[in-house]
Amino acid sequence: MRYSRLKIIFPIGLFLALFLDGSLSNAFAGHLFKYPYSSVLHLVLLWIVFAIFLDDRGELPVGLWAAFAGLIFDWYYTGVFGVYLVALPLVVYISRQIKPWLDLNFLTMLMVYIINLTIVEAFVYIWYLIGKVITSNLADFAVYTLGPTIAVNLALFVILYYPVRQLYLKVS
């Protein structure tokens, strides 16, 4: 019974996060994208990290869902095919590899989330640089995009950790 409820709740939460990523970015665009700074919301990544670390059995096909969410994200939000399609499953793979070595608590998950954010943002930056979508240098990226993105998503993690953890515990 537990797995079937989680199997239903996970994709619903993923698509809610996908929708909220775009909607909240649009609603708060004046604050998130105030020149020269750019803060990117990563609720999809947050939901994926929660799923990896709060699903004790590891039965959810998070990698497949991450690829599907990445495809939708690329198609609908970025217009550059393949960036999130590759980046999100990559983060799932890395997180699953390090999970057995970690003591799962709030601070550990926060650090893993920050590392995953950095990986995704660096991956997107390199992909866009290679594709000549952007021309900014690494220092500008770190100061004007990566820093603000980590700050905003760190706040979201702190706010959402307890409710999402309780949801996973309730479904478990």
Image (cartoon, rainbow, N blue to C red):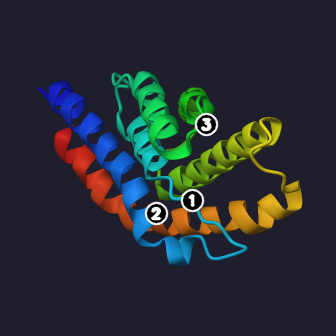
* Contact check, label 2 and label 1, Cβ < 8 Å: yes
**Residue 88 shows which numbered tag?**
none
- The residue pinned by badge 1 equals 40
- Examine the rendered structure and indicate whether residue 52 appears above or below residue 93: below
Circle 2 is placed at which residue position?
25
Query: In percent of the image, x 56 and y 35: which residue is there?
Result: 84
- The residue carrying mark 3 is 80
On screen, residue 88 versus residue 157, left or right, reads right
Q: Residue at x 16, y 32 (%)?
A: 5
Residue at the spot 62% in from the left edge and 34% down from the top edge:
83
Whole-number angstrom distance, CA of label 3 to CA of label 1? 16 Å
Cα distance in 3D space between marks 3 and 2:
18 Å
Q: Amino acid at mark 1?
A: Val
Secondary structure at numbered mark 3: loop
Query: Which quadrant is the C terminus positioned in?
Result: top left
Give the residue type at disc 3: Val
Please tell me which residue lies in front, 76 or 160: 76
Q: Secondary structure at mark 1?
A: loop
Circle 1 crowding by C-alpha within 10 Å: few under 14, some 14–19, many from 20: many
In the rendered image, residue 11, in percent from the top left (x then y), is placed at 28, 35
Question: Depth-wise, is mark 3 or mark 1 nearer the camera?
Answer: 3
* CA separation in Å, label 2 and label 1: 8 Å
Q: Position of residue 88 (x, y in %)?
A: 54, 34
Q: Tell me which label, 3 or 1, sits earlier in the chain.
A: 1
